[in-house]
Image (cartoon, rainbow, N blue to C red):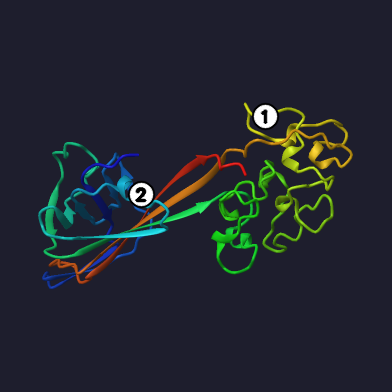
Amino acid sequence: MKFGRFIFILITIFSLSCDDGDIIEVSLDFDNNVEYCGTVVFYKEKNDPAETLSIQLQNVNIDDLFAEMGDATSITRTYTINGTSNRFNYRTYSSLPSNPFCNDIPPADLNVVKDDESSSGIVTLTVEKFQDDNDGIPAEFEDINGDGDLTNDDTDGDGIPNYIDIDDDGDNVLTTNEEVNFSSANGLSDARDFDGDGIPDYLDNDDDGDGVLTRDEENFSSDDDEPNPANDITNTEIGPDYLNPDVNTTVPATRYRTHTIQNTFVLTVEIANINLSNLTQTYLYFGEIEKSENERFRPDFN
């Protein structure tokens, strides 16, 4: 998804009342999500009465903000309303036109009754990044050492903390396939422990306790495929060899499985020090824009 040079972020005015025709008092009531169309417009509209609020920021690219995150979990950028490159407008219409901000060429029937532009303002864009391995275990339950820091819990030592590791024990069987059985009532107390050694399978690198690492219980080399001990079955009545203590065929693993992490970026938009003739508020929380993408990589084998 690419965004153009100008960003318009629009919100809807929920209600207004006139006092002797001189002052329009505005109160805002809108959800946190900002709609968008095309590549440059984020908006909410109101038909009765027909009105919009808009912010225009020059030389700002949302994708660039997301790309700037790197390993950071949050970044903040501020922009000053100056009436030229950065602008904030409140508009009323005789009737709300169709897609007034969503066309490369503005529609001819904008029907603008009044266009009130702020002479001041500070726009704040904050981007937060949230990561999840979608392994069925909430991140707060992957603090193995209980110190409140999720980043230093790495059971398999592959350099990926458990809370974003799709295979916590590095046995090449995905955590989601090791019957974590998480529930809000019981937490992880019902997680499968096949060999009864007190270590749940999703954290146990030898699930059947036969002395052969689960990732090495392969009947063939998987160098050209995604390694997966779950598809190596000697006795179909029992199941995979890694859960059969009577089978210890060993083909040493040479690599980890490809990992997928879901990165969710949440952009929040705020504006302060507003100066509009028909607005009493000086601060507005515009809402949120959310974007998710999957990051795929293979961790180094140790």
**Residue shown at 74%/27% (left/top)?**
220
- Given residues 291 and 43, the one toward you in this image is 291
**Mark 2 or mark 1, earlier in chain:** 2
For badge 2, the amino acid type reads: Phe
**Residue shown at 71%/59% (left/top)?**
188
Is residue 280 visible in this depiction of the protein?
A: yes
**Crowding near pointer 2: few (<14 within 10 Å), some, many (20+)?**
some
For badge 1, the amino acid type reads: Ser
**SS category of the residue bearing label 2:** helix
Q: Disc 2 vs disc 1: Cβ atoms closer than 8 Å?
A: no
Dot 1 corresponds to which residue? 222
**Residue shown at 15%/41% (left/top)?**
109
Where's the C terminus, which quadrant? top right
Q: Residue furthest front?
A: 302
The location of residue 98, given as percent across then percent down, is: 24, 42
Dot 2 corresponds to which residue? 66
The location of residue 40, given as percent across then percent down, is: 26, 43
Query: Residue 191 appears in which quarter of the rendering?
Result: bottom right
Q: Nearer the viewer, mark 2 or mark 1?
A: 1
**SS category of the residue bearing label 1:** loop
Is residue 47 visible in this depiction of the protein?
A: no
User: Left or right of 120: which side holds 189?
Assistant: right
- Given residues 261 and 184, the one toward you in this image is 261
User: Left or right of 184: which side holds 108?
Assistant: left
The location of residue 190, given as percent across then percent down, is: 76, 57
Query: Residue 299 appears in which quarter of the rendering?
Result: top right
**Crowding near pointer 1: few (<14 within 10 Å), some, many (20+)?**
some
**Residue shown at 57%/49% (left/top)?**
133
- Given residues 186 and 176, the one toward you in this image is 176
User: Left or right of 281: which side holds 245?
Assistant: right
- Given residues 187 and 20, the one toward you in this image is 187
Q: Is residue 228 above or below residue 95?
A: above
